[in-house]
Amino acid sequence: MSVDTKASLRLSRIINASRDRVFQAWTEPELIKQWSAPEGMDVAESVCDVTVGGVYRIVMNTLEGKVHTAYGSYKEVDPPSRLVYTWDWEEEESQMGETKITVEFNDMGDATEVVILHELFPNEEVREGHFTGWKSCLNRLEAMFA
């Protein structure tokens, strides 16, 4: 598969937990609240229907009270190995058009390699902002299982 690197990002992280536990952290609202916002932010609300066609919504708050709301729908759900879903922002100033996220959970025995491919960004600036955000979220996910 060819990926336009100007319009996509790919990163991975080894998480010290079983694939089932890491998949749950990605799909259960109360667990999503613990990690699915960059460091220095919190998740005020997490709602998800992890079925093909189901929707999710994650409301993130900055320390200054600014709200960022991610939303989308699930295109592929293959527990505990793969998720594919759309992603955009509700707030008008942050909207970028629908992007696509593929997350693979690779079993490594006592650990799991999480591989994120986020595609269809409108430009490099938006991609870079999301790259920074994903790295920070993965830091929080890793810390959950430390």
Image (cartoon, helix red, strand yellow):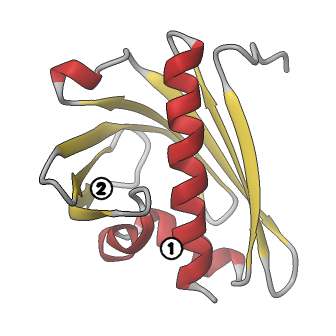
Q: Is residue 43 left or right of residue 144?
A: left
Foreground residue, 111 or 40?
A: 40
Which disc, if any, is residue 24?
1
Image label count: 2
Pointer 2 residue:
48
The amino acid type found where label 2 is placed reads Cys
Q: Residue 59 appears at what percent x and percent y?
A: 21, 52
Residue found 36% across the figure and 63% down from its top: 40
Q: CA distance from mark 1 to mark 2?
A: 12 Å
Residue 106: quarter of image: bottom right
- Label 2 residue SS: strand
Q: Is residue 48 above or below residue 26?
A: above
Q: Is residue 51 above or below residue 24?
A: above
Residue found 87% across the figure and 75% down from its top: 108
Q: Residue 29 appears at what percent x and percent y?
A: 31, 68
The amino acid type found where label 1 is placed reads Gln
Image quadrant containing the N terminus: top right
Image quadrant containing the C terminus: bottom right
Question: How packed is label 1: few (under 14 Cα within 10 Å), some, or many (20 or more)?
Answer: some
Residue found 70% across the figure and 14% down from its top: 6
